[in-house]
Image: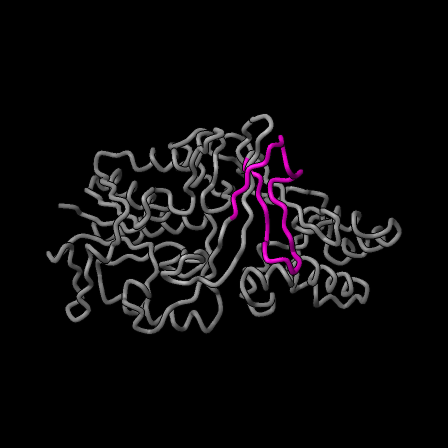
Amino acid sequence: MYDFIVVGAGYAGAVCARMIAEQLNKKVLIVDRRPHIAGNMYDFTDENGLLIHQYGPHISVMNEEKVFDLLSRFTEWIPYHHTVRAEVDGIEIPLPFNLTGIDYLFDVKKALRLKERLIELYGFGANIPILQLLEADDEEIQRLANYIYEKIFLHYTVKMWDLSPLEVDASVTARIPVRLSYDNRHFQHKYQVMPKKGFTCLFENMLNHRNITVQLDIEAKDMIRMDEKHGKIFFYENEFSGGLIYTGALDELFDFQFGELPYRSLEFEFKMWQKDHIQDSSVLNWPDDRPATRRTEMKRLTGQRKDNVTVTITEYPGAFQRGASGYAEPYYPIVNEECQKIYQKYKKKAEKFPQLVPVGRLADYKYYNMEATILRALDVFEHNICKEKA
């Protein structure tokens, strides 16, 4: 019998499973509805020998040493600095928007004047959220802010979230600030690397432990039943006394009793090109009114060298549609007050089950990046799981 059941083999579930198996010496069953581990981080090698990210591009950027040290146990790294460009009025500029972008888009005199005024107001090297820049008192800087808002943020955000930048949570728009420097890297994290053999290999190593059993292509609700009346959990109709680490969506776990939580989803277009490269940056963003948001060239992420062949992934966002043929995966929780009210109802219901530990982007209904997901899993292990077993 298992001491713990972990639902979901992405980062949140895999980290929890490894910590439980290794540090508590407990038996863990980890299950996933998909036919593979690694969740959205899953990658595979195609017929050309190219490493492909099945669910869009994923980057390993970290500031926390404990996250880097943990993952380094399960993979070798290659150095990688992510580059993203946005096409604005037919001109490719670095993203986040920075002083280089001003040089690209405006004549020399105007660019110099804008840069000097920005640095005077905010300081060289500052990262300014677009919503803050829109509130600038300086008339010319406000015009610049409105230009950046429309050309960089407005259409992209509407495509991505079906909301304007003013309607989404400020933490979302703040992820891509206006950067007052010439640093054209997309990220400024301490650690910027990619797993040498891919993310799936990293997960295989993480879950390779004598106390971990993995079962794939299975629905958690086919094996788990929540008895709300008594606050008990049943595993194949036998009462389960161990812990349930759940990384899926809480509304689904509780049969949508308070309605479905909305998510944004993605569809991907994979295309092979008989060229060495198709674009100059890893990712090319289209912050305009075309339906696609961005195109990624995989070779620029993985550092692979293959002549006369390259693969791109173009992303088309849309509303999550449960059970549909398209947009059927919930990728991004919609972070606003209305959705949080619904989520809190499910969270209170989850709290009635002492054995249940929700963790991860779906279970917490938060827009976590990779590092935040891992930190959340480590925190849950230390303060919830270990505490219960102490």
Quadrant of the frame with the N terminus: top left
Nearer to me, 338 or 293:
293
Nearer to me, 215 or 351:
215
Would you say residue 66 is visible in this rendering?
no
- Range shown magenta: 269-298
Q: Quadrant of residue 229?
A: bottom left
Tell me, yes or no, whether the highlighted magenta stretch contains residue 292. yes
Task: Name the colouring of the figure.
Answer: one colour
Identify the residue at the far left of this view.
238
Image x and y of residue 157, in percent:
59, 61
> Residue 49 vs residue 248: left or right?
right
Image x and y of residue 47, in percent:
46, 31
Q: Residue at x 45, y 58 (%)?
A: 327
Image x and y of residue 257, in percent:
30, 72
Image x and y of residue 4, in percent:
21, 48
Would you say residue 47 is visible in this rendering?
yes
Asked if residue 23 is positioned above or below residue 197 in the image, the reply reads below
> Residue 100 vs residue 205: left or right?
right
Nearer to me, 124 or 276:
276
Q: Quadrant of residue 275?
A: top right
> Residue 357 vs residue 52: left or right?
left
Numbered circles on residues, count: 0
